[in-house]
Image (cartoon, rainbow, N blue to C red):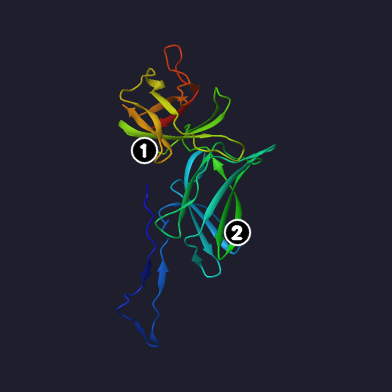
C-alpha cells in the first residue's frame, strides 16, 4: 500500500534568499504538490464550481474490492477543500432496476485534503447498464452533491475475487477477497462479508467463518498444508486467516461460509468425487 505524501509547499528559492532581476525582486513562487501523484486518477469531473478527483492504486474500477481516494478542488480559488464531511453512494442502473453495493464511510486521511473509502462492485457495466457514483459533501455551510457515470470492468486477469450468493438461510451475501501479493509461503489472507438488507444497504456480517481449501486444478488438484480458516476481526471488520501456497501457478481457493451457529450457508467440501466448491476465489502468480 502506498503512503499518501504530506501536502507541502515547494519554494522555488529559499525563504532566506531573494532572487533579483533588473526590475527588482521576483516574488517567491509556491507550488503545491499532489499528495496522490503516485496513484492513478480514475475520474475527474466538475460540478458546483468544484472539481471532484477520484484516485486508486488500480488503473480502473474493477469487480471486487476497490480502495478509493478523493479530493475536491474549489475552482474559484484553486484550493482543495480540507476537513470536510464526505459521503459516497455508488448506484448500478440496470434495465429494470437500480441497486447499490457494499461500501464504507468516507474518512479523512493524514492529509487534510484527501479522503478515502472503499467500494465492492459486484458486476461490470456495459453500454445499457452502468454505474454512477454520487459524492455528497458540505462546505461553507452549504451541502453539495456531484454525480458521475463510471466504467466498472472485469479484472484484467479475469480471476474471481468476489462472490454474490444466496445462502441456505435465503439471505443474499457478498463475499470479497482483499487485495494481496501472493508468494510461495504461508500468506496473510483476508476477505470481507456483507449481507444485502435491501437494494441500498449492505452491512458487514460479523462472527461468521469462512473456511478455505486452496487447490491447484492443473496439478492433480493438490492442496497445501498450514492453512487457517478466516475468522472475524472486529478491529478492521475483516475475516482474516492464512493461505498456504506451495508453488507458483493457478490456484482455486475453495470456500465454505458458516454462520455463528456452525451452519453452512454456502459452499461444498472438496473430495475425490467433488473437485471444487461452488464458492471460490482465484489466484495466479
Q: CA distance from mark 2 to mark 1?
A: 38 Å
Q: Which residue is mark 1?
A: 181
Q: Tell me if residue 76 comes above or below residue 201 in the rendering.
A: below
Q: Residue at coordinates 38% horizontally, 38% vertically from top-left?
A: 180
**How many residues crowd around disc 1 within 10 Å: few (fewer than 14), some, or many (20 or more)?**
few
* Number of numbered discs on residues: 2
Q: Residue at coordinates 42% horizontally, 37% vertically from top-left?
A: 238
In the drawing, does residue 184 fall left or right of residue 121?
left
Q: Which residue is mark 2?
A: 144
Q: Residue at coordinates 55% horizontally, 42% vertically from top-left?
A: 152
Residue 285: percent from left, percent from top: 37, 33
Residue 138: percent from left, percent from top: 56, 60
Q: Residue furthest top?
A: 273
Residue 12: percent from left, percent from top: 36, 73
Q: Is residue 266 visible?
A: no
Q: Is residue 270 visible?
A: yes
Q: Are marks 2 and 1 in contact (CB under 8 Å)?
A: no
Q: Tell me if residue 72 comes above or below residue 11 in the rendering.
A: above
User: Front-most of 2 and 239?
Assistant: 239
Amino acid at each position: 500500500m502506498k503512503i499518501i505524501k504530506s501536502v507541502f509547499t515547494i519554494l522555488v528559492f529559499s525563504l532566506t534568499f531573494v532572487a533579483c532581476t533588473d526590475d527588482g525582486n521576483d516574488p517567491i513562487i509556491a507550488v503545491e504538490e499532489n499528495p496522490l501523484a503516485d496513484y492513478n486518477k480514475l475520474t475527474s469531473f466538475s460540478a458546483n464550481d468544484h472539481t471532484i478527483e477520484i484516485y486508486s492504486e488500480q488503473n480502473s474500477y474493477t469487480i471486487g474490492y476497490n480502495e478509493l481516494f478523493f479530493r475536491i478542488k474549489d475552482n474559484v480559488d484553486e484550493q482543495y477543500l480540507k476537513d470536510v464531511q464526505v459521503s459516497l453512494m455508488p448506484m448500478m442502473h440496470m434495465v429494470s432496476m437500480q441497486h447499490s453495493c457494499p461500501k464504507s464511510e468516507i474518512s479523512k486521511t493524514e492529509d487534510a485534503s484527501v479522503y478515502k473509502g472503499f467500494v465492492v462492485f459486484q458486476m461490470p457495466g456495459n453500454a445499457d447498464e452502468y454505474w454512477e457514483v454520487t459524492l455528497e459533501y458540505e462546505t461553507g455551510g452549504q451541502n453539495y452533491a456531484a454525480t458521475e457515470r463510471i466504467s466498472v470492468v472485469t479484472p484484467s486477469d479475469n480471476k474471481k475475487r468476489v462472490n454474490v450468493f444466496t445462502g441456505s438461510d435465503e439471505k443474499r451475501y457478498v463475499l470479497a477477497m482483499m487485495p494481496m501479493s501472493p508468494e510461495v509461503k504461508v500468506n496473510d489472507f483476508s476477505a470481507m462479508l456483507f449481507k444485502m438488507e435491501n437494494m441500498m444497504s449492505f452491512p458487514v456480517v460479523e462472527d461468521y467463518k469462512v473456511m478455505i481449501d486452496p487447490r491447484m486444478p492443473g496439478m492433480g488438484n493438490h492442496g497445501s498444508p498450514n492453512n487457517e480458516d478466516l475468522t472475524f476481526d472486529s478491529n478492521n471488520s475483516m475475516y482474516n486467516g492464512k493461505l498456504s501456497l506451495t508453488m507458483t501457478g493457478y490456484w482455486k481457493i475453495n470456500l465454505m461460509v458458516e454462520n455463528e451457529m456452525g451452519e453452512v450457508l454456502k459452499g461444498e467440501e472438496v473430495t475425490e468425487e467433488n473437485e471444487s466448491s461452488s464458492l471460490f476465489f482465484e489466484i495466479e502468480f
